[in-house]
Structure formats: C-alpha cells, structure tokens
Amino acid sequence: MFARIDRLGALLSAAGAAALLWLPFVVVKANRIVPGEPRALFEVLPGAAALGCAAALLLAAVVAVGVPSARVRLAAAVIGISALALAVAAAGTALTPVGNKVVRIAAGAAFWVLLVCLGLMATDAITRLRPGPLRRILFLLIFLGVSVLALASGLFDHLSVMREYAVNAARFAHELRQHILLALGSLGAAAVVGLPLGVFCYRAPRLREGILGTLNVIQTIPAIALFGILMAPLGALAAAVPLAERFGIRGIGAAPAALALFLYSLLPIVANTVLGLRRVSRAAVEAARGMGMTNTQVLVRIELPLALPVILTGIRVVLVQNIGMVTVAALIGGGGLGTFVFQGIGQTAIDLVLLGAIPIVVLAFSAAVILDALVEVMDRAKR
Amino acid sequence: MIAVENLTKRYGAATVVNDVSMLIESNSITVIVGTSGSGKSTLLRMINRLIEPSAGQVLIEGKDTRAEPAHLLRRRIGYVIQGNGLFPHRTVAENIATVPRLLRWSSARVAARVDELLRVFQLDPGAYAQAFPHQLSGGQQQRVGVARALAAEPAVLLMDEPFGALDPIIRAKAQEDLLDIQRRFGTTIVLVTHDMDEAFLLGDRVAVMSQGRVLQYDRPTALLTRPTDPFVSRMTGLADRAMRLLSLTTAGEVAAPGGSSGPQVPAAASLRDALSEILWSGADSALVVDADGTPRGHLTLAAILAHGRPA
Amino acid sequence: MRIASALRFIALALLVAFLLVPQKFAPVFAPLTQFGAPAIYDQGNLLSLALAHLGTVCVAAAASTVVAVGLGVLVTRPAGREFLPLSRTLVNIGQTFPPVAVLAVTVPLIGFGEKPTLIALFAYGLLPIFENTIVGLQTTPPAVLEAASGMGMSARQRLLSVELPLAMPLILEGIRLSLVINVGTATIGSTVAAKGMGEVIIAGLLSNNTAFVLQGGLVTALMAVLLYEGMVAFERRVCRTVQSE
C-alpha cells in the first residue's frame, strides 16, 4: 500500500474533493421552475450523518490513491456510492417540510461530480478484474436490482426527480414500454429483412455497392427529417386504406418512427452480415463443399454460425442506436421516454428531462452489456 | 478404378487442363505432380466436380460422375485440402462426424467410427474428441483433417497439397502415416503436390503435369529411367537421379544371403539410406535385418551401385 | 467512378442553387403542401441557416479534434499508460450514450441557444476521434519505430515525424465520422433554439408542412454527404504517401 501513488485515483480524488468543497451538494427550489439555492453537504445533514458520508468518501479517496488491489477499490467505490446515495436521499427528506409537495430538492453539481468520479473508479476496477461475459451480466443484474429496490423503497421519494416520477407514474410505465417496444420491434423487423439481404449482397458482389450505398445515404438523413418525410406517405396510406388505420398505421405517432427506425437499422445489419461472411475461412467452406454439403447446408451450418459474432455485433450497434433514436420520435408523437425529455426542455424543468434521460441511458447501457456478453458467449470458434 | 477421359477445362481463352486421360488403379496412391499453374489442382477438383469440366468425363467404377447430383457424389469421396478447412466452431468429434451425419448414420455407428479413427490417427479420444481445432497443434489438425475425410469409409480419397503447411519432421511422419492408412483401408488415393520427393515417396504411379497436359504417367522408376520429355527429367532432377533411383528400392529387396561385418541396416530402409550408412562406416557391405532384428542377408556396395542406373 | 463524381457534382450544384435562390424551387415542393401553405421556408433565410448549421458543426469538430487528439497522444505515451484501459472503457460507454441524451442533459445546465448544442456536439464528437487516435498510434509498425529510434530521433520527433503521420488516415476517418454524425445531431439542437436547419424541419412538423420537412431534411442530408465526400477527397490528398489498411 502506498508504494506507488495511483495517478488516476489521485486525479479522481482531487476532482471529488474540489467538488465537495466548492460546488453545491443539493439545490433547494421553492417550486418546480424557480432557480434554486445551493446547499453544501454539512448544511443539510445532521452532523453524524454528514461525517459518516464524508468518512466513506475519504476512505474511497485513500483507497483510490494508495491501494492497487482491484477488488478493494471496487468495494471502496461501492461503499462511497452507497454513502452518497443515502446522503442525498436523507438530504431530500430532511429539507422537505412535512406535507409539502411543492418544494423541490435536486441533487447538486457536487453530487453528480462525486458520482461520476466514484463511478469511474468502480468501472476502472471492474475493467482490471476482467470479468467473463456471464459475470458481467451478473454485475449488471445486481446493479439494476439494487437500484430498483432502492427506488421502490421510497428512500429517494423526496428528491425532485422522484417527485416528477410520482406525478407521472402511470405515463412513465406506458412510455417505457412504448420505448422498448419501438426499439426492439424495429430491430426485429430489420433483422428479418436485413439478414437475407446481407446474404444476398454477399453472394452478389456487383449489387453490393449499390445496396450498401443506398443504405448509407439513408443513414445520413437526420432522424427527425426522416420521421417527418415518412409522415406524409403514411398519412396518405391511412386515408386511402381504412384497414391500415385500424392497424395503427397513421401519419403521426409511432408508425413513421417505427418505419424510419427500421430503415436506419438495415445498414449496420446488412453491412455486418456481409463483413462476417467475408471473414469466414475459405478453407472451411471449400472443405464443406468438397464433403458434399449442398449450398444451403454450407450457408446454414458453416458460414452463418462462423459469421455470427460479427452479425451480433451489428445487432448490438443497432439496438443501442435505436434506443437513442426513439427519444427523438417523441417529437412526432411517437411516445417513448423522449416525451419527458422534450417536455422538460419545453418547461425548463430539468428533473423532467432527467426522468426521461436517465432511463434511456440505463437501457442503452444494459443492452450494450448484454449483447456484448452474448457475442462473447456465442463465439464458439474462439473458446 | 477411376477413368479420367479427355478431361478439359477452359476459362475464357485460357485452357487450364488440356485433354487429360488417365486410368487410376484401385487400392493405390496416384500422385499428380507439377509446378504451380500446371492445372493439377483443377484436374483433381474435376474428379469430385467441385469444378465442372468443359469437356470429357470421369468414370468411377464404370459409373459416370455426372449421373447423380454433385453433392451426393462428394459424400462418397474423401477430400483433404491444404490448411485442412476444419470447422473452427465444432469439436474434433463433430468435425469427423460431418459426412456420416450427412449420410444419416445412426448415432451409435457415428460415435464408434469417430472413436476408431481417432485411435488409428493416434489421438486419444478422451483428450481430443471434445477439443476445438484451435487447441490442436498443426500436425494434429492435419491428422483430424484426414480422419474427417475417411469418416464415411469412402473408396476414393482426394488430397490437394495436404502436407504443405507442416514442418519437415511432422511432414515426414504424416507421409509415413498416409502409407499406413492406405494399406490399412485399401482406399484409392489421388494426391496433388509440387514436391517431387513426396511424389516419389508416396506414389505407386506418378503423373507429371505441365501447362494443362500430363507429360508422363508411369511408375516412379520409369520416370527416372525413361523420361519422355525434358521437362520430366528437369522435374525429377538430373543431378541426383541416381540417388532418387536408389531411394525407390528397399534393402530387403536386394539383400543376398550371407553375413556382413558392416553396419546394420533395416530391411525397410531404402538403398540410398543403406549406401549412406556404408559410406559413413567405411565398410564395403551392410547387414540387413528385419524389423524384429533377425538378420536377413547382406548388402554389398557393388549390389547397390548396380541399382543406381537404368536396367 | 465517373457516375459517382457526376452525382456528387450535381448534388453540390443543386444544394448551392437551392440555398441561393430557393424560390425557384417552389414548383417542385408545391405539391407537397396543403391548403395553400408556403412551399418554401419563409420564416428565415435558408442560406444563413445552413451556414449557421455548418458553422456550429465545424466549430465543435475543431474543438473535439484538438482535445481528442491531445488526449489520445497523452494516453499512448509511457507517462499516461495508466489511463489507457479506462480510456477504452470510457470510449465504450460513450458509444452507448445516445447523442440526444447528451443534448438533453446539457440544456438545463447551460440554458438555451447555441452553447448547449456546441457542448453536446463537442462531447459526442470526442469519441470517434479519440478512439481512432489511440488505435492509430498504437498500430504503428514496431519495425518503423525501432528504425526511427535507431536513427537517433528523440521521442518528440518520433511522435511528430513518424507516429502521427502514420496514424493520420485513421484520425481523419474519425474526424469524418464525427462530422457526419454531428450534422444530423445538430438538427435536434433546434429544439433548444440553436440556429440551424433543424428549425426548418421542426417548423414543418409543427405546421404539418411536409415541404418544409423535406427541405430541411434534404439540405442536411446533402450537407452530410458532401462533407463526407469532401473529407474522403481531403484524406486521399493528405495521405497519398501513407499506405492505409
């Protein structure tokens, strides 16, 4: 211990300390829209609690600077984050007069900076431990489980974000479901169309440039533009064919967004399918044909399984991309968590924005972790 | 017996295989040797129709290879290529079981065959059956490649530069093993290589190809003593043709009754190796012994020298 | 290739023509409007909006390049090696952060207008450039590095004369990617009152005027494509002597 000073740890600790001393820990607002008053950590918590939190943070800083063991660092970071979370929850409770539903207590800059620093420390420690794919998913599930439990327990209910949630609870569940459905649904449709299209492009090199080029052009059209452009034809379709309207195909709403997302998802899937197939060992394919497999058998038993890791990587890219883009769909009435984001922007209510943005980031992150692990598990050839 | 009749392959204006005819005897090893671009690989791949001929036909046991769909034909012919082409995502056992499964053998029969082949190729089933190709050494991968080709008990085995990627010591062992396999299973083997030493070591008959034509197709001895084309003698090498000729006969075949005070030489060793031993020892004869050590006769320097030139 | 160059030229010509004399294109867009709505965007000067859009993107890209390349160099030096694994993880995490979320989070902190858009574009544009700088610097052929040291170059000379020039194709590719993504993301900046083509699109969405949406979308897409092609041509000129993978 203390043989070498860990420079990353020193940097993070310095940043965290500076934040704690000079930036507000929480911000107290009399109501939703007025700017708030900053409060420091020791102002808002009773002495013992504040000292406890400070002690945990100090421990994390010491470990960060002097202890090289990854497990200890992870443990210290987790303790620090827990202390921080409890402190901010307690601050919320302490600063809210009983029965008052109007006042808003928001986490201040110091909280966010400390959270980021501790988060970086934890992430760095996890990276050093080099967990396998299954263990990474386990970490993710533990993290998600603990977070959900903590939120459900009512500890954080006095914080402004949770207040916004309380007001919008039913809508939140609906928009969350809508967001996930749109992202996954468009991905599924694109996979069903994109995989065969990718195989086709692989077998027909001359058409490949044209198809990939067209898909590339589609990618450069900005999302809201494509949503908007698709609104007119879909609207016309709904007007001309009443049956379409019964199925939910309308000019506004989720339909143009879903169609646009489908189009955006095609390029990564098709491109990665071609790339994956091209990287399959020529010798294996020749041996398979020489053994008497039909072309279909070679494709299904040899080429596609060996191309699978690259194809799955494409799907991962698409899923994360879609989760982000569904946010924008809110602008054309498509629903999803973006509704909260843009409403919050419109009302200058940061907490509403956070209510939308935080789940979006968590969804994207979880999708990335799960699919990356899946790619690693499926890569049988390398095991 | 495989009858290759007037086989030709053209790509546009270029003729890669030009009117080749040859009769390949059953239960033998036929080697097709030539430099790169001679058309030897193309010729081989026309036998199992991985390349369709522009003209001519191939008859296996009197039956035209075009009489059935290509992929069904190939399930009855073993095929080994340079680099093996083992399926990286399947275990060794699954690789070997590929064609039997395509032929819908029962699981028990497949498992038994996989086990048998692994043992024949000196790979302990317990250790290697569930391993993946990338966990094996180059030599082991090559053996699995050949085992896989033989899994469905084909009468014919086609091999395209199968030992090219191996280092010299492993290659020698692999070539010896191939001779053993052929004797054991009685397969008709057609092997393509650019290595003349390999051709002489393995081939019962050797076809020398250049620019799409077979220049000479004969027993190795004949290629040395009665070359029909300057190219053939260039390929076999003029400088050490005598040595090559000596390498084609074993000590056991030439040993005469009698004893010798010279070095001991195994009956299976070639005359070239025996000559080397005699020279090294300074004696003028060697004692030829069987595999178990019993003396078979003696081999004089004069007898060896007599075999070093055309009869 | 001829067809591609011709298409590019036509695209550029059309774009410039449309921005300079938009009213001439009115007949093309008129069929897309309803109830006699204006066919061409009339709530602002299209040319100045396009230039403002490009300006925002380029300023953000310039800032991202300086910071990202600088950090990339630092992290691949022996002194900064500690930070390398974390940098990789950050790049990974950053890629999963939707660009819209970055924008959404900066606005409440900074306010409305150009600034949050610039910051969001800067932050999101850092990643492709940072990642490519690291990969480019780390894949310098070891034989070349050894030859450079053997010749007597100092570490700084090696960096400037050997490593950076060899990494240039990858770095430029990262800048190109960053630019193209940002052109699209900047349209959303208009939801927070930043000046740009997003204004046209959103006006169209609000008033149900597909002509506006199409104009905004096409101009943005054309700008992105032309920027992409321009960068490719620039890369080819600059990296002519460097062999890329």
Image (tube, coloured by chain):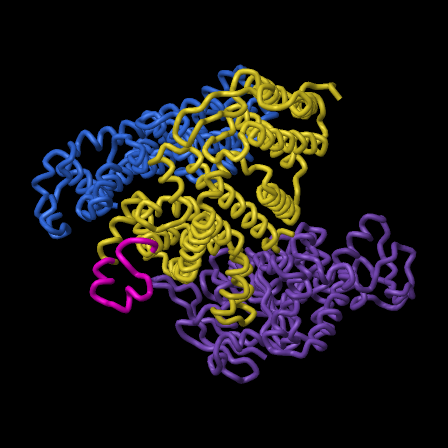
Chain colours: A yellow, B purple, C blue
Residue A293 at x, y = what percent? 53, 71
Q: Is residue C147 visible?
A: no
- Outermost front residue: A99
Residue B254 at x, y = what percent? 79, 66
Q: Nearer the viewer, residue B154 or A92?
A: A92
Q: Is residue C237 visible?
A: yes
| Location of the N terminus of chain A (image quadrant) | top right
**Residue C129 covered by magenta stretch:** no
Residue C129 at x, y = what percent? 43, 31
Instruction: Work out whether A350 lies above or below C209.
Output: above
Q: Main secondary structure of the magenta part?
A: helix
Residue A138 at x, y = what percent? 65, 47
Q: Quadrant of residue A349 in the image?
A: top left
Q: Quadrant of residue B199 in the image?
A: bottom right
What's the residue at 50%, 23% (across, down)?
C73
Q: Nearer the viewer, residue B105 or A273?
A: A273
Instruction: Work out whether A145 lies above or below A237.
Output: above
Q: Nearer the viewer, residue C8 or B164?
A: C8
**Residue A237 covered by magenta stretch:** yes
What's the residue at 61%, 45% (across, down)?
A149
What's the residue at 42%, 38% (across, down)?
A352
Highlighted magenta segment, given as a residue range:
A235-254
Q: Quadrant of residue A91 in the image?
A: top right
